[in-house]
Image (cartoon, rainbow, N blue to C red):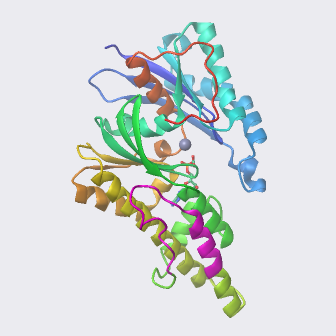
């Protein structure tokens, strides 16, 4: 095996990103650059990501991202060994921006092109950050995703279950909206919950009575709305303490569900080298502490990559592309962008 240096491109949601990753066999991979341009301010007024606005911004910014990634890495295109790009799943207009850019670069340089599934990028991140060996169990938990995966190889995944409706990050964001807290909701809810009383409101733990690893979070939002309106009806308003108690109750319900389903996923997966998380919700200290404890009980290390590599980025795409390339995968210039692409 040879040393490989890959450029990665990502534009499937609301971050435009480019990164360069190098790997010499037998050594830990090196992130030579990791550029992310977010779009939060462009979508803030709309209360969610607007696909057309995202697509246009990606198309306008992806070249700049690539330039910065190469500049920071101190490399010219000709010094690369390949180009990896997120080819889905995601907002199709956005995905196309990076795919077209990657194809252009590959056509101009003759470098190999490798299409990467965005979820594989997240799932392979613990190998980039911690050098974990296959097979390991992964909980991917973000604003758009929530699923348990057994990661058996760069092209081999077994899905054990996941949310049947909302992702937990989405539930945190909706909770923040209902309580007039700032967006993204996760950090705001976590901060208020720290000073709340978890015993005051008891929210449902959906699907805990059902076997397996599927989860549901949309009912929680309804329960929270009802509890909030109950308080408002009683006192003609919400105090800061009411908000804090509601946040604490909500966060406890999400943590309980994630912890119990993680326990079951680990139970059903003997021989794992580790239990890893990725996604924005993995930033939550209460949830992290619960998952750490579950991993300890199962006798496997708990891995949580640093936040900038847990959330959307292109270093994970460069790495996933590099791993796929090592096992012989290449794509042609006919690589297509896919809105849906199960792992
Ligand atoms: O992975 P990510 O950056 O983007 C995708 O969804 O792909 O995750 C963002 C989500 C948001 O819903 C945000 O509210 C949530 O992660 N989040 C958190 C925390 N920080 C971010 N949720 C709970 N607690 C946090 N501290
Ligand atoms: Zn993502």
From the viewer's perspective, tell me whether residue 131 is left or right of residue 73. Answer: left
Name the spot of residue 62 as percent of width and height, x first.
Answer: 67, 28
> On screen, 181 above or below 306?
below
Q: Residue, x 29% and y 62% (percent of image)?
A: 293
- Asked if the stretch drawn in magenta spans residue 211, the answer is yes
Q: Is residue 187 visible?
A: yes
* Visible residue check, residue 289: no
Write down which quadrant ligand 1 falls in.
bottom right
Residue sitting nearer the eye, 92 or 164: 164
21 lies above or below 157: above
Residue at horizontal 41 percent and vertical 55 percent from the top: 213
Q: Is residue 248 left or right of residue 260?
A: right
Dividing the picture into quarters, in which one does residue 24 lie?
top left
Quadrant including the N terminus:
top left
| Residue 182 position in % (x across, y down) | 65, 64
Q: Main secondary structure of the magenta part?
A: loop
Say which residue appears at 68% left-offset and 82% top-offset.
229
| 189 over 103 or under it: above or below | below
- Where residue 212 appears, x then y in whole percent? 39, 56
Is 274 in front, or is 211? 211
């Amino acid at each position: 095996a040879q040393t490989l240096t890959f450029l990665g491109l990502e534009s499937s949601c609301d971050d435009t990103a480019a990164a360069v990753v190098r790997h010499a066999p037998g050594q830990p991979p090196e992130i030579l650059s990791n550029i992310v341009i977010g779009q939060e301010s462009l979508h803030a007024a709309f209360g969610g990501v607007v696909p057309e606005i995202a697509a246009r911004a990606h198309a306008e910014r992806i070249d700049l991202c690539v330039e910065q990634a190469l500049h920071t890495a101190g490399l010219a295109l000709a010094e690369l060994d390949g180009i990896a790009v997120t080819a889905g799943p995601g907002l199709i207009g956005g995905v196309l921006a990076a795919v077209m850019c990657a194809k252009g670069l590959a056509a101009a340089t003759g470098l190999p092109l490798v299409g990467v599934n965005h979820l594989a990028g997240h799932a392979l991140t613990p190998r980039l950050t911690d050098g974990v060996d296959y097979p390991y169990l992964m909980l991917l938990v973000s604003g758009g995703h929530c699923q348990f995966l057994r990661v058996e190889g760069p092209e081999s995944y077994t899905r054990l279950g996941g949310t049947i409706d909302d992702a937990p990050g989405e539930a945190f964001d909706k909770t923040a909206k209902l309580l007039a807290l700032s967006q993204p909701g996760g950090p705001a809810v976590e901060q208020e919950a720290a000073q709340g009383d978890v015993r005051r409101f008891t929210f449902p733990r959906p699907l805990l009575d059902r076997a397996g690893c599927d989860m549901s979070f949309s009912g929680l939002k309804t329960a929270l709305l009802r509890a909030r309106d109950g308080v408002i009806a009683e006192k003609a308003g919400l105090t800061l303490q009411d908000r804090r108690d509601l946040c604490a109750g909500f966060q406890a319900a999400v943590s309980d569900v994630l912890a119990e389903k993680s326990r079951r996923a680990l139970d059903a997966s003997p021989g794992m080298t580790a239990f890893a998380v990725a996604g924005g919700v993995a930033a939550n200290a209460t949830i992290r502490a619960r998952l750490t404890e579950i991993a300890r009980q199962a006798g496997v290390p708990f891995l949580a990559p640093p936040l900038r590599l847990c959330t959307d980025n292109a270093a994970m795409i460069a790495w996933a592309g590099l791993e796929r390339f090592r096992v012989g995968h290449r794509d042609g210039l006919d690589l297509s962008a896919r809105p849906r692409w199960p792992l």
